[in-house]
Image (spheres, rainbow, N blue to C red):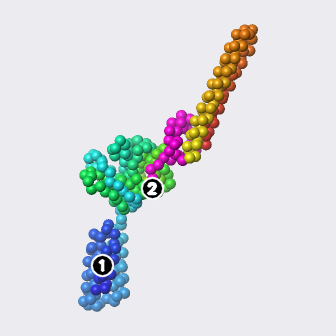
Amino acid sequence: MTRVLILLFVFGCVPNCYSTKFRTLFLLVVLVQKLDYASNIMSYKSYLKLTTVIFTTVLMSYPVAAQDLTSGVAVSVPVSTEIFNKEDIFGKILSYDSGTFAVATSEYDPSMYGVVVRNPVISLQDTSLDESLLVVSQGTAYVTASNTNGNIYEGDFITSSSNSGIAQLATRSGTILGVALEDLVYDNSGKGELLVSVDIRNQFIDNNLRVNLLDALRSGYDAPFLTPVASLRYILAVLIILGSFILGFSTFGRSSTSGIQALGRNPLAKSAIQVSMMFNFLLTALIMFLGLFLAYLVLTL
């Protein structure tokens, strides 16, 4: 009887995902127990060995699926019927905009909400929702990713893409989904399942690539939400550009005014005055160019 109680205790401690498979194991062990009592053909040590072998064999024959390795708290969110009925929705990125949850369809989507998961460890479900999906906004989850923006390796930043719900490599500053915890193994279509540490935030990415100044300034609107160092870079770049343009225009304005006045007072010195005005114009252009160049260095180095 003691052995049966021990087996019941072990069976009760088995995780829910294994309980169905272990019913067969439990019946086998109970059968061995009955035979042991009936004929006393096995010693207690032999019985434990046989039990261990059976338990280990069944355990190894039913590995946990990769999709069950989600961590973090998943929350149920309402979705449309179209999204709810999609067979491949698990692993896709959802965004939240204007009170509606939808599949993310833009790169570096600032409205990213999380990843749709199938079997989270912990979930908070709203039973009043008829059509809802479980979404992890922070934790680890398997995400459907592609190599359209480059191969993904462990430690790379991951973000959304223009491909509906698919993640991709983040190569510039902006909103990211999280960090890859493994290399992406993709199929012929360039897609695959990728384990990601989900932590949606704005991230400054300094990849030491030389980008043009307009592209750098185009992403400057994210500066207040980036790291302090990144924000300081954008602020300094803007101040340098504004300072150089103000200095250049003010210098050119003063020199032009004085040149015109001098030309009126002394028409015989027309050539010298025109040369002086041309020199001041070139000096103004040089000041503006130096300001743009310094701003470029601040943003890219």
Does the image show residue 198?
yes
Q: Residue 236 in the image: x percent, y percent?
A: 60, 39
Judge whether 88 appears above or below 23 on screen.
above
Closer to the camera in the image, 201 or 210: 201
Above or below, comparing residue 212 to residue 74 in the picture: above
Residue at 40% across, 60% down: 71
Residue 33 vs 109, above or below: the answer is: below
**Quadrant of the snapshot with the C terminus:** top right
* Label drawn at residue 8: 1
Per the image, label 1 sits on a secondary structure element best described as helix
Give how far across and how far down residue 103 sits, in percent: 35, 45
Question: Mark 1 or mark 2: which comes first in sequence?
Answer: 1
To which residue does mark 2 refer? 197
Q: From the viewer's perspective, tell me whether residue 81 is left or right of residue 249.
A: left
Q: Which residues are magenta?
A: 199-227
Q: Residue at x 44, y 47 (%)?
A: 159
Q: Residue furthest top?
A: 268
**Residue at x 58%, y 42% (from the top left corner):** 233
The N terminus is located in which quarter? bottom left
Could you say whether the residue bearing mark 2 is in a helix, strand or loop? Answer: strand
The amino acid on which the numbered mark 2 sits, given as a three-letter code, is Ser
Instruction: Residue 205: say if magenta.
Output: yes
Which residue does the image show at 42% across and 43% down from the upper left?
109
Which amino acid type is marked by label 1? Leu
Residue 67 showing in the rendered view: no
Disc 1 to disc 2, C-alpha distance:
37 Å
